[in-house]
Image (cartoon, helix red, strand yellow):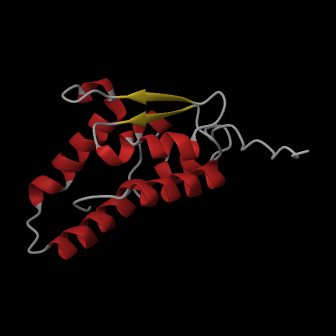
Amino acid sequence: MRRTGHVQEVIEALADMMLARGIPERFCFVNGLEFAAREVRKELGSPGMGTLRIEPGRLWENSYCETFNGKLRAQYLNGEISCSLKEARMETEQWRAKYNTQRPNPALGDGLPVLAARSPLLAPKPLPQPQAVM
């Protein structure tokens, strides 16, 4: 939970994710400068990986994100009052950890998201091996 993000921070976080999980088939860029930035596509794009962009005002095009946002609001935000941004960040991190590690997800056969993320069946394709330069 923060007010803004910088392109380099987004690139580094996505690069770490790709090293851990492999290259996704595509990135989905939601209305926001840090995610739609050309630098992200330039730094992290690979042959065969596509990009999708959700146009401003059409957030329903990304049903996964909207479902999560609805659960975040219903299960957490509507019942909390935070006195500071720091407190809100700490409380949100606690909720996120519980959401991913303790809450069964029906879409995962009542499995936990943290376990599904480690599953080789759900993991994206591996990173390609570097090519020798001659």
> Residue at coordinates 21% horizontally, 75% vertically from top-left?
86
> Residue at coordinates 56% horizontally, 47% vertically from top-left?
43
Left or right of residue 17: residue 91: left
How many marks do you count on the picture? Answer: 0
Question: In the figure, residue 128 lies in which quadrant?
Answer: top right
The answer to whether one can see residue 109 in this image is no
* x then y, percent, for residue 113: 47, 49
> Residue at coordinates 22% horizontally, 60% vertically from top-left?
3
> Residue at coordinates 32% horizontally, 58% vertically from top-left?
5
* x then y, percent, for residue 134: 91, 44
- Quadrant of the image for the N terminus? bottom left
Seen from the viewer's position, the closer of residues 11 and 87 is 11
* x then y, percent, for residue 83: 8, 74
Left or right of residue 104: residue 24: right
Left or right of residue 113: residue 93: left
The answer to whether one can see residue 75 in this image is yes
